[in-house]
Amino acid sequence: MTQGFDCHAHVYARVDEAKGSNYRPLQPAPLDEWQGYLEACSLSGGVLVQPSFLGNDNRELLQILGKLGKNYRGVVQLPKEAGLAQMSELNAAGIVGVRWNLIERRRELPNLDDPLWIDFLDRLKALNWHLELHLEGNRLPELFPALHQHGVTLVIDHLGLPVEADPFADSGFRLLLEAGRGGRTWVKLSAPYRSPVHDLRPHVRALLDELGRERLVWGSDWPWTRHEGKHSYRDTLDWLTGWVSNENDRRYIMEKSPQALFRLGEIT
């Protein structure tokens, strides 16, 4: 019986710093260590996200994913020139989406007037992949509306990194709430330490009200790069309990929503 999925974790042996990366991890994040946490918490699998410091070199992620079964999926980084044939091969290997890590203002946002990016988004839709967006909440208005209008499925990292304590006073967060009516936007309940807002309970309540539990997933963000050693894996589950008091809602967020979004449990 499925007990839930960790929908945001990173596993890597290499700690090379890719060109353009804004950090290098302190140490490797072994697969067996993450799986030990999953087992200890009665979790069935999860989603591995390409580490930003490795850039578009997804080889290690694919090697790791090849050792795992139908309860695991991956999210890669790709250049806009990636073709449908390459992406179809990745799809067969268990890849279900692409991540844009655009955190920190010095990073230039993709130009959605560029035909290559438009074609890239069309390929995501053709494969039923999602676009995972890691971007500060106060910058979401610069990019989110155009992506939403294009019709691609969006997965927003880390509660959208809100910058205001009142979710309805936060222009970026309001965009996520309004997008709930479209049914193509999902939000990860994860990594509260990456937001300048200390109490995110009002934001989660607003997401439950406007998007519904069907558009929410949970992730540990293990191994918590730049925040290593500040909390335990169990703490990340306790945060979810503090945010979502209803046990049925939590179960749905940890089981049903990930299965629908990431096709977990299906044979690729």
Image: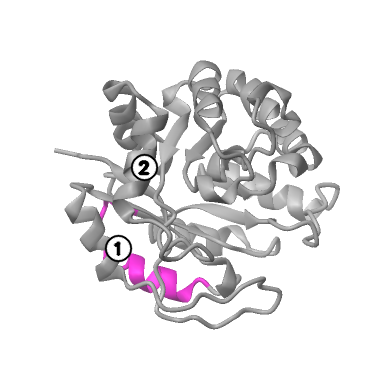
Query: Is 215 displayed left or right of 121 in the figure?
Result: left
Query: For the residue labelled by badge 2, is the local secondary structure a helix, a strand or a loop?
Result: loop
Highlighted range, magenta: 58-72
Q: How busy is the neighbourhood of tag 1: few (under 14 within 10 Å), some, or many (20 plus)? A: some
Residue farthest toward the left in the current orientation of the protein:
1
Query: Is 175 displayed left or right of 99 in the figure?
Result: right
Residue 67 appears in the rendering? no
Quickly name the residue at label 1. Answer: 34
Quickly name the residue at label 2. Answer: 263
Residue 112 appears in the rendering? yes
Q: Please state which of residues 128 and 44 is positioned toward the viewer in this rendering.
A: 44
| Residue at the (80%, 62%) spot, across then down | 106
Q: Is residue 62 magenta?
A: yes
Percent across and percent down for residue 49 are 47, 59
What amino acid is labelled 2 in the image?
A: Arg
Q: Quadrant of residue 245?
A: top left
